[in-house]
Image: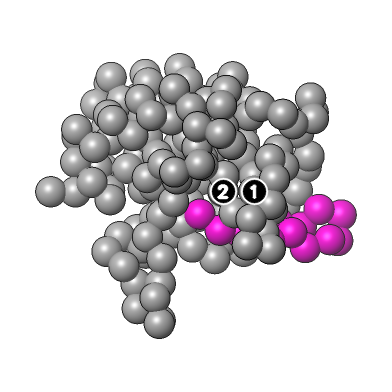
Amino acid sequence: MLKSPLSLALIFGITCALVPVSVAANPLEAVVDSIVDGDTVTLNQGGRAIAAQLACIDTPDWINGQPQTNAQGSKDYLTSLIPVGSSVQYYDVGRANNQTLVVIFSQRQNINLQMVAAGQARLHSSYGRTCRNSAEALASAETSARSQGLGVWGR
């Protein structure tokens, strides 16, 4: 899918420097073990499996084995950003539903923000608290994706 030059500039400009609030100064390193859905992954950190939920975002899920609209598209897009076996950096920003809430970076790109900017995720209602440093960028990315009818915002 082609993106407008404005979208690409927005994505590039806001993804390189955003770091979540209230986390260690240095990110943790891990390898992607599996992509469960568009906002859930399993990470391997030195042999330890981490069930991780991408913080501040929400993607369509599978309910009773049936995908919601764009569930597979969101999962596929996340897989294209962080394929199984790839090395990532992440910030642990809390816990919810027995999962670690994370903001993932790959090649200096904020993956959580990339998902929103591409229209493959919506903002989770907690984004203003959990991701205070990037809340404005996340909201702007969602507004842009929505106005362009991308991904979950498709018309």
Say what amino acid the circle numbered 2 marks. Answer: Leu
Q: Position of residue 66 (x, y in %)?
A: 35, 78
Q: What predominant SS class does the magenta segment belong to?
A: strand
68 or 111: nearer the viewer: 68
At horizontal 24% and vertical 37% (from top left) the residue drawn is 146
Give the quadrant of residue 63: bottom left
Considering only vertical position in the picture, is 71 above or below 57? below
Which numbered dot is residue 101? 1
Crowd band around label 1 with a 10 angstrom C-alpha radius: few (<14), some (14–19), many (20+): many
Q: CA distance from mark 1 to mark 2?
A: 6 Å
- Amino acid type indicated by mark 1: Leu
| The one of 104 and 76 positioned closer to us in this rendering | 104
Image location of residue 2, percent across then percent down: 25, 36
Answer with left or right where residue 102 lies relative to residue 154. Answer: right
Q: Residues within 10 Å of mark 2 (few under 14, many from 20)?
A: many
Name the residue at 19% across, 41% down.
149
Query: Is residue 50 a member of the stretch shown in magenta?
Result: yes
6 lies above or below 120: above
Residue at the spot x=59%, y=36% of the render?
Answer: 130
Looking at the rendered structure, which numbered label has been put on residue 93? none
Q: Which mark is residue 54?
A: 2
Q: Is residue 128 visible?
A: yes
The stretch of residues the image draws in magenta is 39-52
Asked if disc 1 and disc 2 are in contact, CB closer than 8 Å, the reply is yes
